[in-house]
Structure formats: structure tokens, C-alpha cells
Image (cartoon, grey):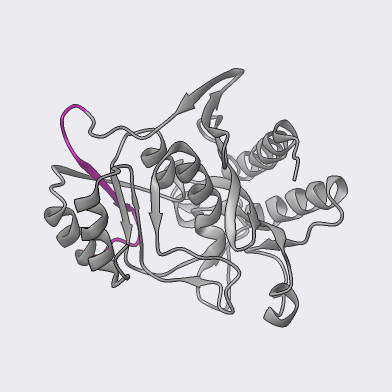
Amino acid sequence: MGFDIDYLIETAKDAGKEILKIYNSDDFGITEKKDNSPLTKADTMSHDLISERLVSRYPDIPVISEEGKNIPFEIRKQWKYYWLIDPLDGTKEFINRNGEFTVNIAFVEHGRPVMGVIYIPVQDTIYFGRQGSGAFKQYGTERVRIKPLEQEYGKRVGISSRSHSHQRELDFYRQAGVDDVVSAGSSLKFCYIAEGRAQFYYRFNPTMEWDTAAGHAIAQSAGAMVFNLTYNKESLKNSSFIVSGLRDRDVEDLIRRELGMEEG
């Protein structure tokens, strides 16, 4: 299916501009969702803007959003494709004002994210990728192709969540020969793998499908391997997963053992 990638980038950037207005204000309008996670005015505003833009341009494609209504599995299991968006990924990072939050737009087809756009409003930086077309990073009008690096500066780097890391991840990194572990918020971790700033991203604690879809598409389009992530499940909660920028059989076997996946 054909998409106007520039339209999607423009949509993500316009949402980011509105998010920054609230980010730079004194009123985030913070409330609490049923799962006790925070919700701000920026989450809701971004959801409304992106959903309206996607429906306007692509009226026949359904939308799943973190801040949208809960669509029954009996309905969505029949979908061949749909948009999956996280209007503000990293709400805690937004509230803490550390800049590590993103706008995520993904297109999922037959249970696989095949296209993703991630916008970092504070940096005015875009990452995007599409299956078969590679992955790119854009700052301003400059657009460069990105790909994982085997090792950065002779080191293997692992990346963990700034807010939700787990000891199991550090234990795996030691087994994988990781020399350094860095932290980042939101879907930035996928972007770091895609551009070679880190070689491993292990997430042991649960995430939701909208947290990972855009980053999954970008990392895989860049050439990374993504293990144990599937989409449009009855429950939209993800199990533990690992993203690797290394294409090495021994590494792949280690990852599969860690995640309890079948060999091959």
C-alpha cells in the first residue's frame, strides 16, 4: 500500500509542535488513567490531531491509539492492516521535562509493523523506515540513511529503559559481552539500535503494542533483528523482547534461549 511519507512526517511534527506548547507551559493538565499511569493534555491533543489527519487522508484504514477507544478483538482480528499510534510516548519523561519523549506512528499489516515514523519534538528530529526501503534520520531538511553498527568505538552497548529497567536485562547484557549500558526514555531506544549507537535493547517488563510498533518498523527496516514482538493480539500487551543490531548466529541463539523461543 502506498503512503505519502512526507504527509506522515508532517503529521508527527505538527503533533509535536502542539505538544511543545504544553511542555513549555505551566499546566500539563495531569490526570491518572485506570492503570495508574499519567495522562496529560498533550497526550489527548496529539491523539486527536494525528487521528483526524490519518482518517482524513486514509479513511478506509482503521486506527488504534493509546488514547483511543478500546476496540474489541472480535472486530480488529479481521483487520488486514491498520494504523497504530502512540501520540506521546514517554509521558513520564514529558512530565519530568527531560526531553526524551516521542510521537509514534506505525502501519501494521498482517500482524507486522511495516512502516514507522518517530518524531522527537525537543530535538526536532525524525526517524522513519519502511520494509524494503531502509531507515532514515532527518533533521531539518537533511535526510540520511541509517543502519546498525556491529560495535561502536570497539564496544558493545546495551540500552535500557530510563523508567522501567530490570536486573534480568543487565544479566543478559553481561552474557552478550556488553561493555556499557546506557539509559533512554520512550521509543528512542529503538532509534539508537537503528543508527548503531547501541547493539542491544532488552525490555523485560511489559509494554503495549503502540509503545513498540513504530520503533520495531524502523529498527527492522534499518537491518536490526527484533525478537518476540507480534501485533494485533487479543491482549495488546507485549511480552519481553530483544532488539539486536548484531546479525550473528551465536547472538541469535543466546537471545532465543533468554526469551524461551524455539531455535531456528
Residue 13's place in the image compared with 78, above or below, is: above
Q: Would residue 158 be counted in the magenta stretch? A: yes
- In this rendering, the count of numbered labels is 0
In front of the other: 63 or 177: 177
Q: Which residue occupies 66% across, 40% down?
A: 12
Locate residue 228 relative to residue 106 in the image: left or right. left
Q: Percent position (x, y) of residue 161? A: 34, 55
Whether residue 120 is visible here, answered yes or no, is no
* Residue 78 makes an appearance in the image: yes
* Magenta span dominant secondary structure: loop
Q: At x 70% / y 35%, what residue is drawn? A: 5
Instruction: Report the residue at 16% width, 52% height from top.
Output: 176
For residue 256, what is the image quadrant? bottom left
> What span is in magenta?
153-166
Residue 10 horizontal side relative to residue 236, left or right = right
Specify the farthest residue to the front. Answer: 264
- Give the image quarter of residue 188: top left
Q: x%, y% of residue 165?
A: 29, 61
**For the C terminus, which image quadrant?**
bottom left
Query: Is 124 or 170 nearer to us in this picture?
Result: 170
Determine the residue positioned at 63% across, 40% down.
16
Quick check: is 209 in the magenta stretch? no
Q: Nearer the viewer, residue 210 or 256?
A: 256
Residue that extends furthest to the top in the rendered view of this protein:
142
Q: Residue 244 appears at what percent x and percent y?
A: 32, 48
Q: x, y (%) of residue 74?
A: 72, 82
